Image (tube, grey):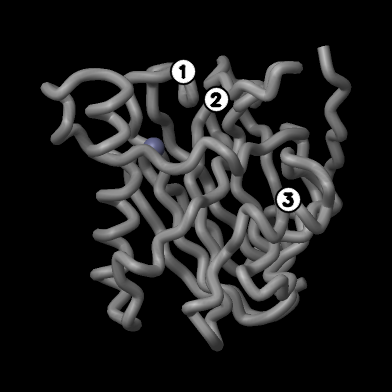
Amino acid sequence: MVAFNRTESQRKGSEAVYDKVIPAGDGWMYELKPNQVLRIVDLEGNQAVDTLFFDAANPQDHYSAMATITAQANIFLTTGSVLRAESGKPLLTIVADTCGRHDTLGGACSAQSNTVRYDRDIQYMHNCRDTFMLQMANYNAGYEKRDLAPNINFFMNVPVTPEGGLEFADGVSAPGYYVEMQAKCRVTVLISNCPQLNNPCNAYNPTPIRLLIWDK
Ligand SMILES: [Zn+2]
């Protein structure tokens, strides 16, 4: 078993300037101010939270798994990870993490991935790409399909085998685990609280998450 780097936060929930529960399968799009801290809480455990970030001042510069992985020379995200945009610009830094590991290789589920991985009959099941599209349409700030890029799956466990293979494994998270990240600039956050029912990323049981924001 790998030893995870689990770091707790000193921030108090009572001092948060924003506090919202996102139901299972729902989404959220929101702009963080510089230095604001976003905490995502896995309320019931083993939920996958598919997330993208954008430089709000230049939305075409979206989160880049490649830039992030290359700069930190590690494929997993945890405390200390700097989440970077395509240009290499730091968007956020993970400042606390009681789960200890998050995936940025597995991508978001979509009608296409559901069809290829599981069955043609489930092509129309609710998926993260649908949620991303709906959130962007409602946000009404010019974000569109072309702005979707390979994302982060907070709380999702995608171990890499010694041969370099990927597995979607049972979650390593538990009820109440959280991850906290601080914005380095104005950052637009796009979340799909994954509705997936066909793989163990959320224990076949999508559950709500809680989002808290502090000003620093
Ligand atoms: Zn999903």
Image: 56 above or below 20: below
| Quadrant location, the C terminus | bottom right
Mark nearest the camera among 1 and 3 is 3
The residue to which callout 3 is attached is 69
Ligand 1's image quarter is top left
Which mark sits nearer the N-terminus, 2 or 1? Answer: 2
Mark nearest the camera among 2 and 3 is 3
Point 69% across, 60% down: residue: 67
**To which quarter of the image does residue 123 belong?**
top left
Point 57% across, 36% down: residue: 42
The residue to which callout 2 is attached is 46
Mark 1 Cα-neighbour bin, 10 Å: few <14, some 14–19, many ≥20: some
Point 57% across, 19% down: residue: 167
Which mark sits nearer the N-terminus, 1 or 3? Answer: 3
Image: 214 above or below 210: below
Is 38 or 164 nearer to us in this picture? 164
Q: Is residue 45 left or right of residue 177?
A: left
Q: Is residue 169 left or right of residue 21?
A: right
**Gap between marks 2 and 3, in whole Å?**
23 Å
The residue to which callout 1 is attached is 200
Kind of residue at badge 1: Pro
Q: Residue furthest bottom?
A: 57
Is 193 or 67 nearer to us in this picture? 67
- Residue 89, percent across and down? 71, 75
Please say if the residues under marks 2 and 3 sit with CB atoms less than 8 Å apart.
no
